[in-house]
Amino acid sequence: MRNKGFTLIEMVVAVAVFSLLVGATSSIFLSSIKNQKQSLATQEILDQTSYLMEYMSRALRMAKKDMAGSCTGAAKLNYAFAGQCLKFLNYNGACQQFCLEGARLKDENGNYLTSANLQVANFAVMLSGASQPPADYLQPRVTISLNVAGQEQTSIKIQTTVSQRNLDIRK
């Protein structure tokens, strides 16, 4: 009569195969969780920088020339960028600004425009046509460049150029 059962070698082989399957499955699962975290962090940084650029662009499109220089610091300027602050007169004639303070952008009221989850590494502004004759005859434009870092080692470099909605040449 022959015993029915598994030998020690068969048991070791079965445990080894089972361990390999569990290890492969768990590594795939952990990898997918890591990729999902990375994807969510990338989506968050895209959402927030998109909102930020749209908010700033809308305000800059409606800017007016500062005839008295009360906001920009010099008469007949449309925009001024100094000390990490972009200043201009908004459509209501009130001084509006976007400033980099620490690693976050703020508006003129001290409200943060970026969340604590994002770090603005670089806020660069290039102005063209901001001063009218005799310097140039260009429609005022502002180019904003941001380098923003988020969670899970995500980062984005984004740039946009905005011109004023109303023509402001040779005034």
Image (cartoon, rainbow, N blue to C red):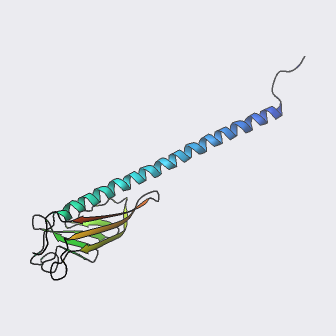
Q: Quadrant of residue 117?
A: bottom left
Q: Residue at x 42, y 54 (%)?
A: 42
- Compared across the picture, whether 87 is left or right of 17 comes to left
- Compared across the picture, whether 49 is left or right of 32 comes to left
- Closer-to-camera residue (89/126): 126
- Closer-to-camera residue (33/11): 33
Which quarter of the rendered picture does the C terminus lie within?
bottom left
- Compared across the picture, whether 15 is left or right of 157 comes to right
Q: Quadrant of residue 94?
A: bottom left
- Compared across the picture, whether 168 is left or right of 10 comes to left
Task: Give how far across and how far down residue 41 sits, in percent.
Answer: 42, 53
- Residue 32 drawn above or below residue 58: above
Task: Give how far across and how far down residue 124 sits, in percent.
Answer: 32, 72
- Closer-to-camera residue (27/128): 128
- Residue 105 drawn above or below residue 130: above
Task: Give how far across and how far down residue 96 sits, in percent.
Answer: 17, 68
Q: Quadrant of residue 143?
A: bottom left
Which quarter of the rendered picture does the N terminus lie within?
top right
Q: Residue at x 44, y 58 (%)?
A: 154
Q: Residue at x 83, y 21 (%)?
A: 4
